[in-house]
Amino acid sequence: MIMPLAPAQVTMSEWNIIVIIKDGKKIEKFLGYSLHDNTYRISSQVLEYDAENKRGFTESGSVYEFIDAPGELHPEAQEIFDKLNAWEMVSVSLKFEIEQP
């Protein structure tokens, strides 16, 4: 039996919200670099994103804190985005545009 992960407190950088559409259903997840885990992290469904306070809350009960604004993904997170985007059965995009230098 697979046990769900307990809610976590996550500090993330180089992140964005990915929007996944499959069979007309839209799912939004945080994807970025977890400073605690030192690797990419993808969240459960986003319930709320508070840009002013740089915090987010997910369906699993986890709290995400962001050290920067949403934008370009960390290279490890970008690999995950690219793998998801390669699936023909889903449409994947970033919710927030990447600022060009």
Image (tube, rainbow, N blue to C red):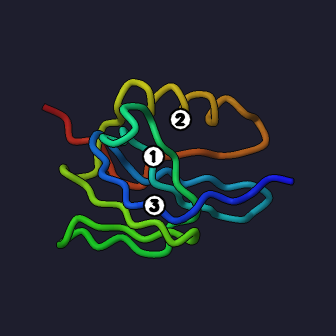
Closer to the eye: label 1 or 2? 1
Disc 1 + disc 2, Cβ < 8 Å: yes
Q: Earlier in the sequence, mark 1 or mark 3?
A: 3
**Distance between mark 1 and mark 3 Cα atoms:** 15 Å
Residue at the right extreme of this rendering: 1
Q: Measuring from the top left, give residue 80's x and y in whole percent.
A: 55, 32
* Residue at image location 51% in from the left, 25% down from the top: 79
Residue 32 % position (x, y):
39, 42
Q: Nearer the viewer, mark 2 or mark 3?
A: 3
The residue singled out by tag 2 in the image is 81
First-in-chain label (1 vs 2): 1
Query: On the image, numbered disc 3 is attached to which residue?
Result: 8
Question: Tag 3: residue type?
Answer: Ala
Say what secondary structure mark 1 lies in. Answer: strand
Foreground label between 1 and 3: 3
Q: Residue at x 34, y 45 (%)?
A: 15
Q: Amino acid at mark 2?
A: Phe
Q: Amino acid at mark 1?
A: Leu
* Foreground residue among 55 and 98: 55
Q: Is residue 97 above or below residue 63?
A: above
Q: Name the spot of residue 35 as percent of width and height, x first.
A: 30, 40
Front one among 90 and 79: 79
Badge 2 marks a residue whose secondary structure is: helix
User: Which residue sits at x=51%, y=72%?
Assistant: 61
Circle number at residue 31: 1
Q: Residue at x 12, y 31 (%)?
A: 101
Q: Position of residue 44 (x, y in %)?
A: 58, 59
Query: Callout 2: 10 Å neighbours few (<14), some, many (20+)?
Result: some
